[in-house]
Amino acid sequence: MNRTDKAAPAPVLTTPWSDLALTRHPEDPRDPLRAWDAADSYLLKHLAEQGVDLSGSVVVVGDRWGALGTALAGAGGRAPTVISDSYLGGQATRTNLERNGLSGPALLTTQDAPPSRADVLLVRVPKSLALLEDQLHRLRPAVHADTVVVGTGMVKEIHTSTLQLFERIIGPTRTSLAEKKARLILTTPDPSLTPGPNPWPHRYALPDGIGPLSGRTVVNHAGVFCAEHLDIGTRFFLQHLPRATGARRIVDLGCGNGIVGTTAALTHPGAEVLFTDESYQAVASAEATYRENASGAARFRAADGLEGVPDGSVDLVLNNPPFHSHQATTDATAWRMFTQARAALAPGGELWVVGNRHLGYHLKLRRLFGNSELVAGDPKFVVLKAVKQASGARGRRK
């Protein structure tokens, strides 16, 4: 990062109560994406225009980069409780609060016990309908007849099925007019509703033909990618994972439900496996899947990838990187994962990656590692291997 980057001011969100400088995490002045969108702005404006009482227990679910939590922390009411599945989102919230001289919100993960009472419940609609279902079920006991319940999202994120979840679990639901391609969900709690039990987490048997985990049970908490079946990319990866490499320190980077790392544990007896993901739901799924099928040395952590892992301390990294950040398509996460893997690997250590063929990961790996080998491929996916050299030029982000 150069001097100009360091001096670049954070984008400013104007709220009904104050102007706030906000960034995503990790902070990157070259990132064109803001820490808020029209859905966040619409919700904040609605609260102010309707004179919603913020002096009671305010609960914010799914705040993506801290815009809602930071704004409400400065709105003059009681500091809100912010519940997020995202480690990166939580870090962004902390940074944005500090940047704007604010404090107070309680930051919870989706795996923590929810608050016992919510006088105002604000829901940023997630990409995953399952995660929304799980969170509404978990928070329903905190909702009472007078709770103000407002959801928000971009028009393309709100579907009939979204509204049906609010209606089935919380109460009668309607939507607002669209504003700047955003919409609000307005729900009136009905204490007499009996929505039934929360169906999450979900368990299912894996198919045959995928290696040591064939026919075994996988556990998925809500919101984890392909929570109800094995996705075809992971299936292809499982069929071509390295076996008996001699690796003693293995990382399942972006572990999801932990199928890849658990397979590695079974094929590398005695190795220590680190499962890491920025999603708390994913890490909980990975631990449950591992405990169901394996034993031995394993660690599970929600984190920014391999941040904090000592350089040169890992023998093998297995990675199926995402190429979306919420609704945005980006290679920033994959690039960051590859860069972190290169630093964490010992000389001679290997990074194995599966990805869609069209994403061109081989070019990034060659730039970072100086090499990239095609292990397997089909018309849709490729499995690539890059080896950490004892010395060599470091790559730069394009």
Image: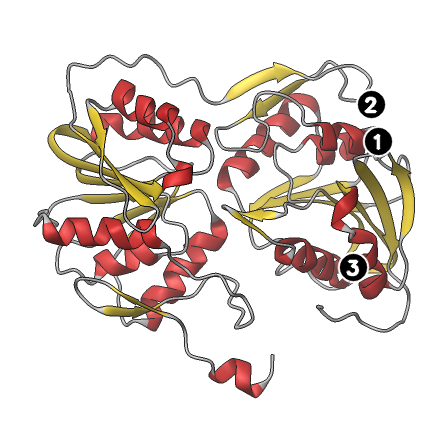
Residue to which mark 1 is pinned: 267
Q: Secondary structure at mark 2?
A: loop
In the picture, measured across the screen, residue 221 lies left or right of residue 294, that is left
Instruction: Name the amino acid, label 2.
Output: Gly
**First in sequence: mark 1 or mark 2?**
2
In the picture, measured across the screen, residue 224 lies left or right of residue 210, that is left
Q: Residue at x 18, y 35 (%)?
A: 117
Q: Does the residue at mark 1 contact the one at mark 2 (Cβ under 8 Å)? A: yes
Tally the numbered discs.
Answer: 3
Instruction: Name the amino acid, label 1.
Output: Thr
Q: Residue at x 11, y 52 (%)?
A: 49
Seen as rendered, the residue at the extreme bottom is: 3
Q: Secondary structure at mark 1?
A: helix
**First in sequence: mark 3 or mark 2?**
2
Q: Residue at x 37, y 57 (%)?
A: 36
Crowding around mark 2 (Cα neighbors within 10 Å: few <14, some 14 to 19, many 20+) is some
Residue to which mark 3 is pinned: 364
